[in-house]
Each structure stands twice: as C-alpha cells, then as structure tokens.
Image (cartoon, grey):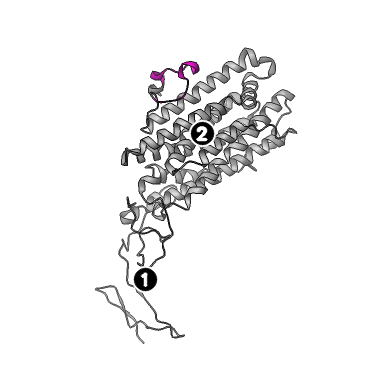
C-alpha cells in the first residue's frame, strides 16, 4: 500500500482503515488542525515562556468556554467529551490580566527552604528574643498554609480553559508549603520550639476557607489576609535579629507579593466585567475586617512582634509598642489602598476604626 500526502489539501491518501487487530482507525489527527498549524513561537531571552506561545487562537481565553472538559484550550474537542462538572466557567470568575506574567515569575524564582537559608549561621539569641521569634514563626506556620488550602479547594472547580490561572495557583500552593516549612524550621532550628496558638488565628482562617464564592475567598485571602502578612515580611529588616531571618523574610516576601498582585487584579477584573460582584465582595470584607481586627489584637503574636521590633523585652514599652503600632497602621493603610486599586473602595464602608488606628483616608488614596 502506498501512502501519499496530497500537496493541495495536506491530507494523506491510502491510509489503512483498520488496525492489525481489526479495530477501525481514525486518522483525523493526521489531517491537519483547525488552529494555526505551522506557527512556530520564538523563544525569548528567558526561554520559551507561556507568553511566547499565547499567540493566535492559543492565546484567546474565552469569556464563556464552550466545553467543561480537561481538553487543552485550542484542541479540537469531540462533542461527546465528558463534562467535568466545573462551576467556575466564566473568565471573570478566576482571571487576572497579570496572571501569565506572574506564573512565569513564580517558576523562575522558586527557592529552597533547605538550601537557600543559611541555617548554620544562626547566632545564639537572648532567651526573650528567641522566644519572640519562635512565637512569630509559630503563628506564621499556622496562617500561611491557608493560602495552599484555599486554591486547592477551588482549582478543580475552575474551567480548564483558564489553564494559566490554575497553573499560577499551583505555584502559590508550592510557595505556601515552602513558607510553612521555613517558619517551622526557624522555630526549631535554634533550640527554641513551637509556642502558643490562639483562637483568633483559627477564626480568620475559617472565615477565608468557608467563603461562599471564589471571588469572595480571593478578596478575604489576598486583599486582607495575605496582604497583612506581606507587610510583616516587608518589615523583616526591622523584625529580624540576624541576617538569617532577614533572608527568610525577604525570600517569603517575593512570593507573597505575587499572590497579592494576582488577587488584587483578579478582583479588579471581576468587578470590571460584572459590577454587581462588588457587593458580594463588600459583604465578605465587612465580616473579614472584624475577624482580622481580632487577629491583629492577638496578644501573643502582637507582643512577640513588639519585642522583636524593640530589640528585647527591656525596650518593648519605650520602642517596641510604638513600632508595632506603626506596622499595624501600615498594614491597614496598605489593605485599604489595595482595595482602591482593585476597584473596591472601602473608605466609606470599612469596619476598621480608622481614627483609633490614626489612618487618614487621604493617605490611603495617596498610596
């Protein structure tokens, strides 16, 4: 049997119609494709990125995908492909305009809590400072893993046409596993240990994980929860008693900044596509702010931060508490500024005691 390719149609002629075992053969895959067959992406300086291959129909993310299968976006999908039962089937449910770039950054900047932190350089600390660092790391170990659990809860419900968003959330899960690892290791690495867990932390985590919609969950986690943690990491230079902790906070900060950037831009995209979504986000944040304020008054976490910021218990009243108040003011101001960038202004609706915190709304708008 002679098999030839038709130079005009590109189809192959003379192909067998049955396998050696007698099963019928379908050569549809060999007859070309409906997409940009022959398009060849050019790798850039960083290699072949997801941005490089997002060309033509392959780069078009549909607002309402026609399928609910795991078929790759751009493939020729059989009409009898099983329905995977996705419930997040609108692009605005999960998308952010920066998600592809954030994914590329995430895979390029992965680090190791085992090798990239100089654990053997940890100095011996005074007992009060070691207790304070262990308490901070205990709380951070507890709260960081929620940002793994939450994407895992929702990812399998997202339409597979939003692949890049799902891929980014996979990197977030890995990031947060590493954060839980690095803070647990620091609590144990210098002869200290894991200390006190309070109910305020668990209340915040439960509020996030039990959000009714993914967009509400994103607002609670990225705008509120992770945003507050990001500001703690940004204060790592002041909190850290040695260069080892400074590096630990610096490495975690770059990850957390990506997560917050995705969440902020997802909320913005969702509200731009459907302004009615804003109210459900506000309702979630109404409750979330109250719970977060309770978390912020956690006596163990707060006093431990004050000791670290002050440089010891002997300086906690003269220096530590003032610096802790500055940090808290920065956290709430940054949160309100993120809401503005996300298109969800909270300045006239917030449950936060702005006067008590010493926050000027004009300062928020200037951020």
Residue 137 x/y as whole percent: 64, 33
Question: Which quarter of the rendered picture does the N terminus lie within?
Answer: bottom left
Please state the horizontal and vertical placement of residue 246, each as a whole percent of the image. 60, 30
Whether residue 338 sits left or right of residue 8 in the image: it is right
Q: Earlier in the sequence, mark 2 or mark 1?
A: 1
Whether residue 107 is visible, yes or no, is: no
Tell me where residue 258 appears, x and y as whole percent: 47, 38
State which quadrant residue 285 falls in.
Answer: top left
The residue lying at 64 percent from left, 22 percent from top is: 303
Say if the magenta span includes residue 308: no
Q: 149 or 326, which is in the foreground?
A: 149
Mark 1 surroundings within 10 Å by alpha-carbon count, few (fewer than 14), some (14 through 19), many (20 or more) = few
Secondary-structure class at tag 1 = helix
Name the residue at the top extreme: 318
Toward which corner of the image does residue 84 lie, by quadrant? bottom left
Check disc 2: other Cα within 10 Å, few if <14, some if 14-19, many if 20+.
many
Callout 2: SS: helix
Q: Which mark is residue 29?
A: 1
Percent position of residue 41, x then y: 36, 55
In this rendered view, identify the residue nearer to me: 154 or 53: 154
Residue furthest to the bottom in view is 1
Looking at the image, is 86 positioned above or below residue 341? below
Q: Which residue is located at x 32 percent, y 66 percent?
A: 33
* Residues at discs 2 and 1 in contact (Cβ within 8 Å): no
Q: Which mark is residue 225?
A: 2
- 2 or 1: mark nearer the eye: 2
356 falls in the magenta region: yes
Q: Gap in Å between the C-alphas at discs 2 and 1?
A: 48 Å
Look at the image and tell me whether residue 26 can be seen.
yes
Residue range of the region highlighted in magenta in the rendering: 349-363
């Amino acid at each position: 049997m002679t098999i030839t390719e038709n130079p005009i149609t590109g189809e192959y002629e003379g192909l067998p119609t049955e396998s050696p075992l007698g099963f019928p053969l379908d050569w549809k895959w060999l007859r070309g494709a409906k997409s940009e067959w022959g398009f060849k992406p050019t790798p850039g300086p960083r290699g072949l990125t997801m941005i490089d291959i997002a060309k033509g129909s392959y780069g078009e993310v549909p607002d309402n995908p026609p399928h609910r299968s795991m078929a790759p976006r751009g493939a020729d999908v059989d009409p009898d492909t099983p329905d995977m039962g996705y419930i997040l089937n609108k692009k605005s449910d999960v998308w952010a305009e920066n998600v592809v770039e954030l994914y590329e950054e995430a895979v390029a900047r992965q680090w190791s809590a085992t090798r990239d932190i100089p654990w053997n350089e940890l100095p011996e600390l005074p007992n009060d400072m070691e207790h304070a660092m262990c308490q901070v790391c205990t709380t951070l170990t507890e709260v960081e893993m929620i940002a793994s659990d939450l994407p895992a809860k929702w990812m399998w419900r997202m339409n597979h046409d939003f692949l890049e968003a799902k891929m980014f959330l996979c990197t977030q899960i890995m990031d947060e596993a590493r954060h839980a690892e690095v803070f647990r290791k620091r609590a144990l690495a210098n002869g200290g240990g894991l200390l006190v867990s309070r109910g305020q932390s668990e209340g915040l985590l439960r509020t996030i994980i039990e959000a009714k919609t993914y967009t509400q969950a994103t607002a609670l986690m990225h705008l509120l929860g992770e945003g507050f943690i990001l500001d703690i990491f940004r204060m790592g230079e002041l909190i850290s008693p040695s260069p080892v902790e400074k590096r630990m906070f610096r490495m975690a900060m770059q990850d957390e900044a990506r997560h917050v950037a995705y969440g902020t831009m997802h909320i913005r995209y969702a509200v731009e596509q459907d302004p009615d979504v804003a109210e459900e986000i506000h309702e979630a944040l109404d409750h979330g702010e109250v719970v977060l304020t309770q978390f912020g008054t956690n006596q163990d976490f707060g006093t431990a931060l004050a000791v670290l910021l002050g440089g010891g218990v002997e300086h906690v009243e003269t220096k530590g508490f003032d610096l802790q108040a500055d940090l808290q003011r920065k956290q709430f101001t940054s949160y309100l500024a993120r809401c503005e960038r996300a298109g969800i202004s909270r300045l006239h609706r917030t449950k936060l005691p702005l006067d008590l915190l010493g926050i000027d709304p004009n300062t928020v708008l200037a951020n």
